Image (cartoon, rainbow, N blue to C red):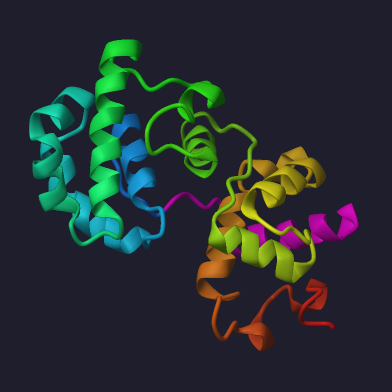
Amino acid sequence: MQKEKIDQIFTILSEVSGDLKTELEYSNDFTLLIAIILSAQSTDKSVNKATKSLFEIVDNPSAMLELGEEGLKKHIKTISLFNSKAKNIIALSQILIEKYDGVIPSIFEELISLPGVGRKTANVYLNCVYNHPVIAVDTHVFRVANRLGITNAKNAHESERILNKIIDIKWRITAHNLLIFHGRYLCKAIKPLCSTCIINHLCKKYNE
């Protein structure tokens, strides 16, 4: 897709949606990272429901270790893959204390070395905390970008590479949130609301 058309897409989405932020609820950098990890293959709504009581007693790595893996599981058992997520979060908390003095690293390579932190999680965290102009690709972003014709990627990693290359830097801070919200509420996986979509005239799939 031509960059002029991409610019039109994000201009329209931005005008309608405004300055979007993550729908995950958190109180500090640590709780944000935990919420992002928990949101993998889960909805933000389900994560917020589970973490409401959790974040009242845990807001740092030491408190997470005190709670322990079994204690954490009791709070997040309604979230998909809660067993592996709990194991990773406890291991992550231990590493943060031993290697980083309890402070979450701000370097991408160090972030993805932490248990449970993949490329998407690291990019979302860096975008939210430091306003890094990076695009995190989840299922919504991957689907919407392909449908619109911005990309023709086979997987999330390829989509991330293409999007960060072709989308103008002025949009990269907000782009993934704009695509996520568009995918969540309009360009749905099943029965997308194409006829009422505000950018259907720019959409490759709609105009095929």
102 left or right of 66 in image: right
Q: Nearer the viewer, residue 162 or 155?
A: 155
Q: Residue at x 26, y 27 (%)?
A: 93
Counting the numbered discs, the total is 0
Magenta region, residue range: 1-22
| Dominant secondary structure of the residues highlighted in magenta in the image | helix
Q: Quadrant of the C terminus?
A: bottom right
Magenta span contains residue 11? yes
Magenta stretch: residue 206 in it?
no
Q: Looking at this view, is 32 or 114 the one in front?
A: 114
Which image quadrant is residue 169 in? Answer: top right
State the image coordinates of residue 159 (x, y, percent, origin top left): 70, 52
Quadrant placement of the N terminus: bottom right
Q: Is residue 96 left or right of residue 112?
A: left
- The quarter holding residue 144 reads bottom right
Residue 170's place in the image compared with 199, above or below, is: above
Residue 152 located left or right of residue 89:
right
Residue 72 visible in the current orientation: yes
Query: Residue drawn 41% across and 59% down?
Result: 41
Q: Is residue 153 above or below residue 95?
A: below
Residue drawn at 57 percent across, 68 percent down: 183
Residue 111 in the image, given as x and y percentages of width and height: 47, 27
The residue positioned 35% from the left and 31% from the top of the image is 29
List x then y, in percent, for residue 38: 33, 49
Report x, y in % for residue 97: 26, 16
